[in-house]
Amino acid sequence: MKKFPNRWGEYLFIYPAVIFMLLLIGYPLIYNIILSFQDVDLSSLASGDKHFVGFDNYKALAQEDGFGISVWNTIVYTLGSVIFQVVIGFLLAMFFSMKFRLASFLRGVVMISWLIPLTITALLYKFMMGSGEGIFNQMLMSIGFIDDPIQWLSNPDIALWSVIIANIWVGIPFNMLLLSTGLSNLPEDVYESASLDGANWFQKLTRITIPLLRPVLLVVLMLGFIYTFKVFDLVFVMTGGGPINSTEVLSTIAYRLSFNEFEFSIGAAAANILFFILLIVSVIYLIMINKDEEA
Amino acid sequence: MSRRKEWALNILGIVFVLIFLFPVYWMIITAFKSQSEIFQSTPTFWPKDFQLTSFIDIFKDNVGQYFLNSFMIAGLATILVLVLAVPSAYGLARFNVRGKNPMILLFLVTQMLPATVILTPLFIVFNNFHLLNTYWGPVLTCATLGVPFSVLILRTFFLGIPKELEEAASIDGCGRFKTFIRVIVPISYPSIVVCGAISFFFSWGDLIFSMTFNRNQDLWPLTAGIYNAIGRYGIEWNDLMAFATVSVLPVIVIFIILQKQLVKGLVSGSIK
């Protein structure tokens, strides 16, 4: 029975996936950074003339229509989505943690909203948020909550929040699921002794549940931030960044520059800014979970 | 818990889920409505005139081809993910190779990267290798979504398998690879299926990779097809919702079959 030479066999298990990720993620990542300091558009891509231009692309990006607002929108979008997702997800996790018969089944079924392709979710909300035929306006008007239809996606002051609403719907189940797991790992005897001491529901929530759940809450917040910050599909399909840049985010502006205007280098610069912010948050996140494991 | 409270909680839970999933219901029934019924000022919550014309319309409009493409892209990407991720996760759980922690870190970090960062460079690279307008562009890139996720979930799972199992197999004269295929893979089957399903969902939902790397409509998956149809169909919401329903169907079917395992797998993959 011939065995693999010891180390080589082990590397053969591990390395193909690592090499695959380095080739398809690592290499493009570095390429993208280089690209953002070169001058590459459709014509120089064909001719192969890529000279370095320093920070010109970043300067051009800063002057780009809609860039400033796209940074702001990305932040508002992320914070708005994450805060509501976590709060609602937490309340639902508390609700489903009461051990009634259908609890775990119902909690599972809710996951459907997370699994639907974002393109479809975006289209569905676009339909429901239609100003005349949309069910949202029809319902709100029939209960007399509003007199005139809300221009969910065509009013620049509202459009970003309309996309946030759709994103909250998508994200609730995932947050709920993680928080449910966190809740089920809390020690029950603490609650019992608190009850004996006469603590009420609200005191238990603020003095026991939330402090004990803090590490899980932090992880959920950070993961939510990371996954929301790179939003593309929802915005792209629901509004395409409009009206008048009011929903433009970093990833849509990067895409538009690269693939509609074929300014590859300026698009790369926009994507890099997105990457850089995410990198910082990811590093903080990784340090956090590392500390958690040591503790 | 008192009986009355138990009832109240169950009913409350059901009501919440019905409201929460109303958009999905609304999508499906709209697909069966006529155009005039959709534009009535009072909405109908069940189609007055139940019709299949929207489904017939969209299948005349190449939806069959899109569906097949989605299956090809998601299916191939899933196979690629499993072939790469299962051995890698096993190796990272069992072997003491140098650089193990950086490699685990690599998978953690790549999971968090935005697609937009790799899009432009890969467009240029794929262009040089003549991979634009083939299935391979989206297949390779979609696999990058599933690989890190699966490696991390499966590694946690493999760490939990007692080592005695492999030791027994190696006494029986199985080499490392044979042990892996004959012993480890069969007992890990449920976890592998979960990773496969989740990778399939990731790829099934992809829009940006297909849209960027394939300008050829005949290779588009459902997501790209539907994005393109939004402009062309305008306000023919019944057709669009029929299109959406067809796109969601496989996801819902797989979800119903694997619900319990999926929920468990998602939790362990995200927290650890």
Image (cartoon, coloured by chain):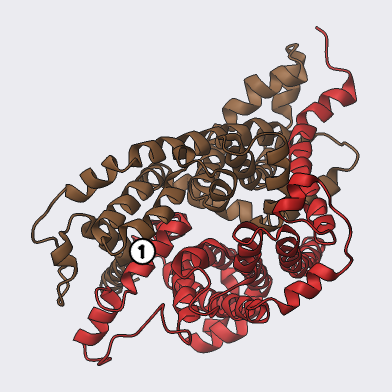
Chain colours: A red, B brown
The residue positioned 14% from the left and 62% from the top of the image is B46
In the drawing, does residue A40 fall left or right of residue A54?
left
Residue A209 visible here: yes
| Nearer-the-camera pick, A168 or A199 | A168
**Quadrant of the rendered image containing residue B136:** top right
Label 1 marks which chain's residue? A
Q: Which residue is mark 1?
A: A124
Quadrant housing the C terminus of chain A: bottom right
Q: Position of residue A179 (x, y in %)?
A: 55, 67
Q: Quadrant of the N terminus of chain A?
A: top right
Q: Is residue B207 above or below residue A235?
A: above
Instruction: Kindly give the residue lying farthest to the top in the view shown.
Output: A1
x and y percentages locating residue A136 in the rendered image? 30, 77
Label 1 is placed on what type of residue? Leu
Residue A267's place in the image compared with B58, above or below, is below
* Closer to the camera in the image, A57 or A26: A57
The image position of residue A99, as x and y in percent, is 41, 65
Q: Secondary structure at mark 1?
A: helix
